[in-house]
Every structure is written in structure tokens, then in C-alpha cells.
Image (spheres, rainbow, N blue to C red):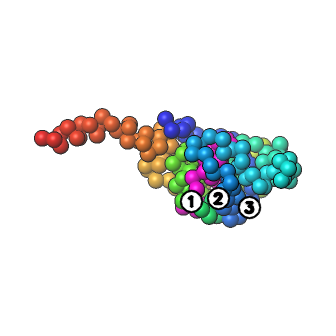
Amino acid sequence: MAYDKFTLLRSSAVPMPIENVDTDQIIPARFLKATERTGFGDNLFRDWRYNTDGSPKKDFVLNNPIYSGNILVAGRNFGSGSSREHAAWALYDYGFRCVVSSFFADIFKNNSLNIGLLPVQVSPVFLDKIFTALEANPHSELEVNLPEQTLTLLATRESESFEITTYKKHNMTHGYDDIDYLQAMKADIQSFAAKSMY
């Protein structure tokens, strides 16, 4: 299994209302030497999280102990810039399982879906409501229901639907990457191949 199965996620969230966050800000290029998915979480938002001496920047949200959870709520146009897969890897390795925004860069969105990080695109109005709720109560919870394709702000029960392709939805609910998907069909593929030989 490539990653954890994703069906229903109920969690508090980390608000980062910054627009146009690109992949170099998510994981700076100098940390892209490894080819495995692990270890990148330590350097997630490295230049925003830490000073040059390695000490944490107190004003950055990931260093604020009042916010926690498996959901990152981000501003519009999240994941723009280069196509590096490591940006999605870093978010997943840090512990995020879902990123909410009003717009995602296409390549980042696909890279995220490939490794089990669910990008949930909502309307700008609903995104603002989530930010407002988290500002009022940092422990406010969101519920992400992948089978129903809904995101709910539990404090108010307001909800919006989000889009995902049938293929990616199937893979995420089973914890499959593209290779796992094919391996799950191995018997069918072998049967088809055997019939095709005659």
C-alpha cells in the first residue's frame, strides 16, 4: 500500500491565509537531494519556520502551539511554481492529510493525489468562513468526507462539496498509487492476456 487509506477525516486545522504559496516556499530546492518520500517534513516551509541560526520563528503558524491538526487551510493559488513532487511529500511527511484552498496549481494537485494528500478546493466565501472560525477558536474542527465529497465546518455545520475524479477517489479510499492500482487488477490483467493469446 502506497499510503494510508483516506475516507473520513475529522481534525482541527492549521490556518495559513497566504496567497500564491509556491513549491519553493513549501520545500526549498536545497532540500531536494533525497529520492524517498520520508524526512521532508522537517524542512516544510523551512525559510518561513526557521531563522538562519535554526531557531524557530515565533510568528509563523507552524510554530504556534495553539494550532494543530492534519488539515492545512491555505490561501488562494497554493502550490504554484515548479512541478517538484517533494512539496506534496513534505506536507504529507509533516502530518498533513488534507490541504484546503480556493485554488490549487494543477501539477501540485495531481502530485498530492498521487501520494494520498487530499487537495480540497472550496469557494472563496467558504474559505473565508473557515479562516474566521479558526481565528475565533483555534480548536474548531473540519470534517472531510471523501466518499460524499464534502467538507464541513463542524462548529456551524456549514458544508461544501468538492470535486475529485473517480479514479483518484478510488485510489485514495484504497490507499493506492498508480502502481498499486495496476497490481490490484493483476488477476484481471492476466486473465485478459491469457484469453488474448488464443
Which span is picked out in magenta? 83-106
| Camera-side mark, 3 or 2 | 2
Classify residue 127 by image quadrant. bottom right
Q: Which residue, given by chain and number where applicable, does mark 2 sit on?
A: 23
Q: CA distance from mark 1 to mark 3?
A: 20 Å
Dots 1, 2 in contact, CB < 8 A: yes
**Residue 191, horizontal then vertical, whole percent:** 24, 36
Amino acid identity at mark 3: Ile
Which residue sits at x=54%, y=59%?
107
Q: Quadrant of residue 37?
A: top right
Q: Which mark is residue 18?
A: 3
The residue carrying mark 1 is 83
Inter-mark Cα distance, 3 to 2 = 13 Å
Residue 161: image x %, image y %?
56, 54
Identity, as a three-letter code, of the amino acid under mark 1: Ser
Q: Residue at x 44, y 45 (%)?
A: 178
